[in-house]
Image: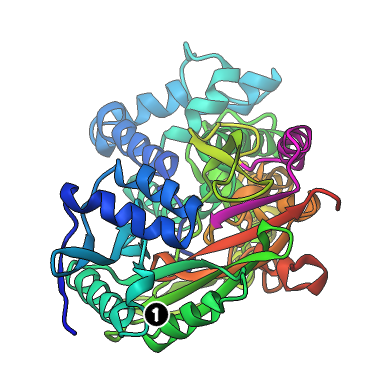
Amino acid sequence: MIPIRDENPNNETPYVTYALLGLNAVVWIFLQGAGFGTSLESSICEYGFISQDLFGSGGAAVCPPSSTSPTLSLVTSMFMHGGWMHLLGNMLFLWVFGDNVEDSMGHLRFLIFYLIGGIIAALSQGFADPQSGIPMVGASGAIGCVMGGYLMLYPRVKVTIAVFFFILFWTFRVPAYLMLGYWIGVQLLSGLTTSTAGGGVAFWAHFGGFVSGCVLVYFFKDKELLANHKFYGWTDTRSEESIWDDPRNRQ
Amino acid sequence: MSFDIVPLEQEHLRDVINLITLHDEDDGESAEYDFQHGLEDHWVGLRNGKAIGITGYRQVPSTDGTGYLSWTYVHPDHTNQRIGRSLLNFVIGESRSSGTKKMFVKVSNYDDGSNVYQYGVKLYESAGFREELTNLDFYDIGEDQVIFGLELDTSFKESVEIKDERPTIRFDGIFNISETEGAYTFSWNVQKNPLFGPRSFTVQDLYTGLRAVHEDGGRIVFLTFPSNLPLIHKPLQEAGFKYVGSLKNYFELGIDEMHFVHRMEE
């Protein structure tokens, strides 16, 4: 199940979302060799986040020692990807949800929100498996943060999703709370039922990023930018100018 | 008796100022000052080479085809000859053909016993103007400003969705509104949006302006804003401003001009 678009127009151009999409693409092509050759593996080992490097304990190392500090890798890892589908999937989610979250807090705040969300996501995966020597890469933790923020801000927005069944697919319009609720439920269940020993999807990063987004958005959202927003909150927004409907506020 | 309507030229100016002064000395002075900024879009009614009427309009900057009816007077010796109606119909036609989509006219409801206000209103309403709002006690206590509007572009218009804007508005001065006794307004400018901090002016900003008006002896403050600025309403209401009304589609289709008032004794 993937989101295709939402029915939530922007007030302002989402420059940071566009920049993040571009930066991830540039890193993928120029630093990771677009998935070809030895660049992919070396970049993942060099810039990926490895729990045991930060927490100082662990099992077998998969990668040779990296020159990137474990702390810095909390940030660099969120711009690395493991394959084309990994990159495209993440960028699709960022494309659909990032613009409106940026619209709710402004450009610079959104960038900080995104980076903090990505760091918390990586740390969540690290706490879940501190001994892991497997590098973790991907923007999905930070994007999970964006999705958590989106759920808190715009739960009623209709999101068009595509559901695939082999070569067939169907599209549906569902409220954001259903789509995002389903997504985080799957992450939680998968995290609880999947062993982290062999690598694979970092469900706890998704979960941690999402929860951090739900909380952080409370501090990062800008009430001025959300004033009169048609889809803000769980109920219909009362327009700011309706304050003048009160006869006491009229000449 | 017929008369000619010709563009206002420098040679007509003295007669025209005198004509206006015959009705109202203050208006005569204001018109003289106003005409220093240009005579375009003004016409004079001539009979036997003598100015017997004046009319015209002014485009409002930063709007999509909004105009105000300018000085429109008939010489007192030539009233009741449908000259005013002819001048008004002429200026409406001229402004429509030059792209004006909506025209407004501001009038005082002061009546010196000659029923001039009632005559004026009757004339404007017969031309299609409709009252849109009244600023009570605008010119003086008991003398209101009534604003009439006339849609000139009557073609079918699909409803448009207007995007809210959140400019950073900061007040930068107060000034006495001309032709009024103690009515003030604030001037404001739009600044670059900050990365952090409020865009909206605050209730404290409004209090600062109100204090300055009070110290200057003002009795009332009028403010106007476009209707697509959601951040203005809360501070205005908290500072005690009251909503007067709106001039519909003033800035463009779907964006009105909202009028607010604050009485100093409140």
Given the image, what chain letter belongs to the residue carrying mark 1? B
Left or right: A95 as drawn, with respect to B44: right
Place residue B65 in its image quadrant: bottom left
Could you say where residue B237 lies in the image, as x and y percent from the top left?
76, 56
Report if residue B255 is visible in the image: no
For label 1, the residue is: B159
**Quadrant including the C terminus of chain A:** bottom right
Which of the two residues, B69 or A39, is positioned nearer the viewer here?
A: B69
- Please tell me whether residue B90 is drawn above or below residue A123 in the rendered image: below
Q: Which stretch did the figure color magenta? A: B200-225
Judged from the image, the secondary structure of the residue bearing numbered disc 1 is loop
Could you say where residue B158 lies in the image, as x and y percent from the top left?
34, 82
Instruction: State how many labels appear.
Output: 1
- Please tell me whether residue A248 is drawn above or below residue B190 in the rendered image: below
Could you say where residue A177 lies in the image, as x and y percent from the top left?
64, 69
Rendered residue at 30%/76% (across/down): B88
Q: Is residue B204 magenta?
A: yes
Residue at the extreme top of the image, as rendered: A67
Rendered residue at 45%/24% (across/down): A47
